[in-house]
Image: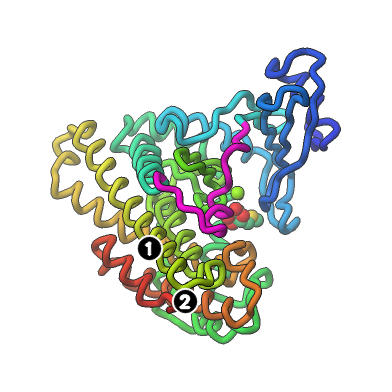
Amino acid sequence: MGYETLNEQTAAEYVQSKTSLFPKGADLDCREIGDGNLNMVFRVWQKDAAKQSVIIKQSLPHARIDESIVAPLERARIESEMLVLHDTHCPGLAPKIFDYDREMYAIIMEDLSDHVVLRKGLIAGTVYPKLGEHLGIFLARSLFFTSDLGMDPLKKKELQKSFVNPDLCKITEDLVFSNPYFNAENNKIDPEIRERAERNWRDALLKREVAKLKEKFMTQGQALVHGDLHTGSVFVTQDSTKAFDPEFAFYGPMGFDVGAIIGNLVLNHAAQVWHKQDLSDRKKFQGYLLETIREIWRVFDKEFRNLWNEHVHTPLESAPEYRDDYMKRLLSDSIGYAGCKMTRRIVGLAQVEDIRSIKDVNVRRDAQIAVLDTAREFILHREQLTSIDDVLEVIQKFAMP
Ligand code: SR1
Ligand code: MG
C-alpha cells in the first residue's frame, strides 16, 4: 500500500491492519483532532473499552496553514525517531511510540487525552506545579545527551546525518527570523500595531542581532533540538509533562529550545491582562509564570552542570572555566531566541491563541506591544542579561499594570 491520506473512516481500519493494539474485530471509533498547522491527527478508540485508544499522526504533503509552504512527508520519520530518543534520554517526558509507517508517513503513538495542551491550560489560568522542573530536566537531558558533551562526537556526526531537516528549517528561517523584519507577504499585522511592527523594520541594530541569531540557527549543530518547543507542543496534567510534536528536529543551537518555551511563557504572561481580569488573580498567576521561567532555567542549569561533571572527562572540556562560559552563552542564546519567537507570534504568519483570543482590540494592542518591546530588549541585551533574575526584570519592566 502506497501513501494515501487517512480520514476518519480509514484511520480505524488502518490501525487494525497495522498493529495488534486492539483485539481482532473490536468496534473502533475515530475522530480527527488535529488543530496544528501541518498534519492530520486522529484519535482511535475502542467503543466498549474507554481506556483503549491511540493517536495516529500523518504527514500531509503541504502545510495546512499555507499550501505554498513546502513540508516534506519525511518529517514524520524525523519526528518518530526524535520521540524515541526523547523517551530514551528523558523517560516519562515524551509520548510512547507504537509504530512508524514509512510508506504512509504515519506515527501511531500513545494517546495523551488525559492531558491538556499546555497553551490551553495556561490560557485557562491553570497552575502546573511541576512544569518548571520537568521542562528543565527535559531540556538538559535531551540537549546534553545529543551534543558532543554527552555522546561520542563520531556517533553524533552519524546521528546528525539522519536529522538533516532542510525544509522545516527553512520554514523557521523564514517565519521566525526573516519575515517579521520586513513587509513579507504572509505576515499578519493587526492595524493597531502596524506602526510598532514597522519600527522594527527600521531598527538596524535589532535586525543585525536577529541576523546573528539566524546565522547561529543555520550553522551551529550543537545538539539535536526539538525545533518547535512552544506551549502547544507540551501536554500537561498536575503531575505529568510530555513534550511532543518534534517534527522540526535538527542539529541546531541548544538555546533555540530553551528560548522557545520561555518566549511562549512570556506571551502567555502578557495575554493574562485579558484572560485574568481580576488584578489580584492576575498578579498571582503572572507570578506563577515568572516562577516557572525561573525554575526551568534553575533546573536546566543544575541538571546540565551535573551531567557535565559526571560525563565530561576530556582534559580540555572538563575545565570548570569552559563549563561556566558555556552556560553563560546558553543563557544569552536562549534569551535571544525567546525574543525572536515572541516577535514572530505577534507579527508573523502563525500566531498564538493566548494573544489572538483577546477580544478587545485596545487590550490586545497593548499586550502585543508589551511583547514586542520585551522581545527587542531580550534580543539586543541578551549578553548583558547574565542571570535568570535579570531576564525576569525585563519581563516585568514591560508588563502592563
Ligand atoms: C507552516 S508551519 C507554521 C508554524 O507552525 C509550527 O508549529 C511552527 O512553529 C511553524 O513555524
Ligand atoms: Mg507543531
Residue 12 drawn at (x, y percent):
79, 28
The residue sitting at 40% across, 77% down in the picture is: 398
Does residue 170 show up?
no
Amino acid type shown at disc 2: Ala
Q: How many C-alpha atoms fall within 10 Å of the one at disc 1: few (<14), some, or many (≥20)?
A: few
Residue wearing tag 1 = 287
The mark found on residue 103 in the picture is none
Q: CA distance from mark 2 to mark 1?
A: 17 Å
The mark found on residue 370 in the picture is 2
In this view, the residue in front, 271 or 103, is 271
Asked if the beta carbon under badge 2 is closer than 8 A to the nearest atom of ligand 1, the reply is no
In the rendered image, the vertical position of residue 205 relative to residue 154, given as above or below: below
Label 1: which secondary element: helix
Magenta residues span: 111-130
Residue 281 drawn at (x, y percent):
46, 66
Instruction: Select label 2 or label 1 by which is in front.
Output: 1
- Closer to the N terminus: mark 2 or mark 1? 1
Label 2: which secondary element: helix
In this view, the residue in front, 262 or 100, is 262
**Which of the 4 image quarters holds residue 20?**
top right
Are the two marked residues, 2 and 1, in contact with CB atoms closer than 8 angstroms? Answer: no
Residue 358 drawn at (x, y percent):
62, 71
Amino acid type shown at disc 1: Gly
